[in-house]
């Protein structure tokens, strides 16, 4: 559990995770382009599907503004591949089964779930600049409407 909260101006914690195809992806691989790195609880659940599909539907405007999108969850690569294929997702999904990267970003900890305090993934989004420095850090975001609010924050048109 963590009380860590990353702030804008902080270098993003380094990582190396497998994507939905089993290919390693590192923070260094993301340098050179602005990146929306979002953490979600579980593939193929209603809220996470809504959020992923919102990113999918906004990918042209985000990419047009110079952003790439990368999702991270605790799901294994095979489940992430199924999620990608089922919902036509066009961006990488990374697997962090031991939640080490979640912890490094401060997105693993206590949260409220149906009125009870539980330990788990805190749905969060980070925007990284071309050098891997955090420019936006949003914790405890809601799945529905999040992408539209993020696009507004970034000044990205629909």
Image (spheres, rainbow, N blue to C red):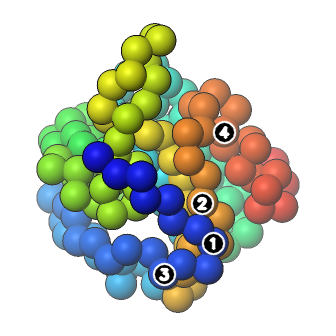
Q: Marks 1 and 2: in contact by CB < 8 Å?
A: yes
Residue 85 at what x, y percent from top left? 33, 37
Where is mark 1, residue-wise? 8
Residue 46 at what x, y percent from top left? 45, 19
Q: Marks 1 and 3: in contact by CB < 8 Å?
A: no
Q: Which mark is residue 146?
A: 4
- Residue at 61% from the left image edge and 52% from the top image edge: 138
> Which circle's residue, 3 or 4, is located before the other in the chain?
3
Question: How far apart are the two marked residues, 4 and 1, measured between alpha carbons?
Answer: 19 Å
Tell me if mark 4 has few (under 14), some (14-19) or many (20+) residues whose alpha carbon lies within 10 angstroms of its own. Answer: some
Question: How far apart are the two marked residues, 3 and 1, measured between alpha carbons?
Answer: 8 Å
Where 118 falls versus 108 (above or below)? above
Can residue 147 be seen here? The reply is: yes
Q: Is residue 144 left or right of residue 48?
A: right
Residue 80 at what x, y percent from top left? 26, 41
Q: Which structural element holds mark 3? A: loop
Q: Which structural element holds mark 2? A: strand
Q: Which mark is residue 137?
A: 2
> Which circle's residue, 4 or 1, is located before the other in the chain?
1
Which residue is the extreme one toward the front? Answer: 3
Tell me if mark 2 has few (under 14), some (14-19) or many (20+) residues whose alpha carbon lies within 10 angstroms of its own. Answer: some
Q: Marks 3 and 2: in contact by CB < 8 Å?
A: no
Tell me if mark 1 has few (under 14), some (14-19) or many (20+) residues whose alpha carbon lies within 10 angstroms of its own. Answer: some
Tell me if mark 3 has few (under 14), some (14-19) or many (20+) residues whose alpha carbon lies within 10 angstroms of its own. Answer: some
Residue 43 at what x, y percent from top left? 33, 32
> Which circle's residue, 2 or 3, is located before the other in the chain?
3
Where is mark 3, residue-wise? 11
């Amino acid at each position: 559990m963590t009380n860590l909260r990353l702030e804008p101006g902080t270098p993003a914690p380094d990582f190396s995770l497998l994507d939905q195809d089993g290919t390693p992806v590192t923070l260094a691989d993301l340098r050179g382009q602005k990146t929306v790195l979002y953490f979600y609880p579980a593939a193929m659940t209603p809220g996470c599907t809504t959020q992923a599909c919102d990113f999918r539907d906004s990918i042209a405007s985000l990419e047009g503004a110079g952003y790439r999108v990368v999702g991270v969850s605790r799901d294994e690569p095979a489940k992430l591949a199924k999620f990608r294929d089922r919902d036509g997702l066009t961006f990488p999904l990374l697997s962090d089964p031991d939640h080490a990267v979640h912890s490094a970003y401060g997105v693993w900890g206590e949260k409220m779930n149906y009125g009870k305090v539980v330990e788990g993934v805190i749905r969060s989004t980070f925007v990284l600049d071309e050098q891997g420095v955090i420019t936006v850090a949003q914790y405890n975001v809601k799945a529905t409407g999040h992408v539209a609010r993020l696009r507004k924050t970034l000044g990205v048109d629909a």
